[in-house]
Image: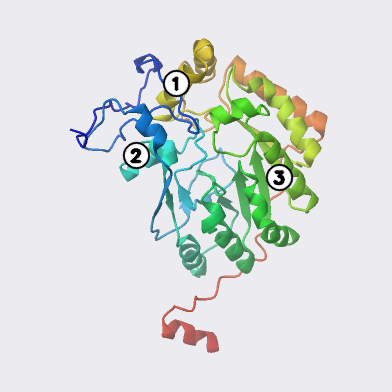
Amino acid sequence: MPNEPIHHREIPEGFEPDDIPAPLRAIRGRGAVQNPTGRYEAASRAGDDPDELAGRRTVIRPLAVRDAMSRNDSPDVPFDRAVNPYRGCEHGCIYCFARPDHAYLGLSPGLDFEQVVFAKHDVAAALRRQWARPSYVPATLALGASTDPYQPAESELRLTRSVLALALECGHPVGIVTKSNRVLADLDLLQALAERGLVRVFLSVTTLDAGLQRRLEPRAAAPHARIGAIATLAEAGVPVGVLAAPMIPAVNDAELEAILTAAHEAGASSAGWILLRLPREVGPLFDGWLQAWLPERRERVLSLLRSARGGELYDSRFGVRMRGEGPYAALLAQRFELTRRRLGLPSEVPPLTTALFQHPRPVASARPAVRQLELF
């Protein structure tokens, strides 16, 4: 019967790539080649029809939020708060560490993650409520720390733009990471924020090879478009940097110096890098991608990754999860440092200012008693 659930093995925490069935078929325009059952779903599927999966169009669903900001205490990232206007991402980056979050919504971290995207239409209103609290103390807000704030839906919904407009109104600092040249649609707001020392943008550039990019990140901007966005932002006076991320062993790691150099020549004033991370379901999904696109390199890729992760494919420990350890990871770090110095890029970027922050005024729909206080 067509409506019966199809069985598909759930993916355990301690995944081994050899457990994944082969061969797997690439799907044009999508990163994942599988749609495994989310770990919290009651029913499971076994053998999705590749033609049906390939024919599915992206669906945007609303997602209500009460508190827009998420908090973290990780020493590995330079921020303690973030906002993501979207859950799921149509860019379809096969390595995206946010994929496992879709399981909390009863969906697959595989193709569902890139085909079913949730939009937080009230994200700016929720953020306004949080910032209006007298106890709120500002610090740089990471915009798009998990999923890209400038994925295709942003062109119509403009949720990221609404957050930037609120940040400008309140004098709140914002840091942006994106793989899209759609960021240029908000150049007016970014310039206004930059003039007040309130914004820094990072373009994530994974590869300069357009063919490889289309396989790794099928619906993200092409490499030349990202480098072009860096140039436009720099010319407009918006502080912009590059993230060579993720570095994938035997896939794109040979491009580290070329990525940094191209971005610097375009106007990037800072740089960073991250080693491939494969938490939870991302591990088997990435292995499926290797089987579909680079089967001849699969063993080499996984072997090098294990060498940097203590023999495993993922290590969640603070201090090593972003960079890895061991000879391979040390060589990557050395190559980055030598290139950074050669290009004259700073080892650290100055913090954005919080001195201009003002709590937002209550919105027009606030209770009359609250609005009345503005008269005194």
- Circle nearer the N terminus (3, 1): 3
Q: Is residue 204 left or right of residue 268?
A: left
Residue under numbered circle 1: 287
Looking at the image, which residue is at 74% across and 36% down?
263
Looking at the image, which residue is at 62% across and 26% down?
211
Measured as percent of width and height from the top left, residue 193 is found at 69, 60
Measured as percent of width and height from the top left, residue 214 is found at 57, 30
Residue under numbered circle 3: 229
| Disc 3/disc 1 C-alpha distance (Å) | 31 Å
- Circle nearer the N terminus (3, 2): 2
Residue 270's place in the image compared with 64, above or below, is: above
Front label number (3 vs 2)? 3
Per the image, label 1 sits on a secondary structure element best described as helix
Q: Is residue 191 left or right of residue 299?
A: right
Looking at the image, which residue is at 39% across and 55% down?
63
Quarter of the image where the C terminus is located: bottom right
Per the image, label 2 sits on a secondary structure element best described as helix
Residue 177's place in the image compared with 309, above or below, is: below
Measured as percent of width and height from the top left, residue 173 is found at 63, 57
Q: Is residue 81 left or right of residue 15?
A: right
Q: Number of marks in the image? A: 3
Q: Is residue 361 left or right of residue 182?
A: left
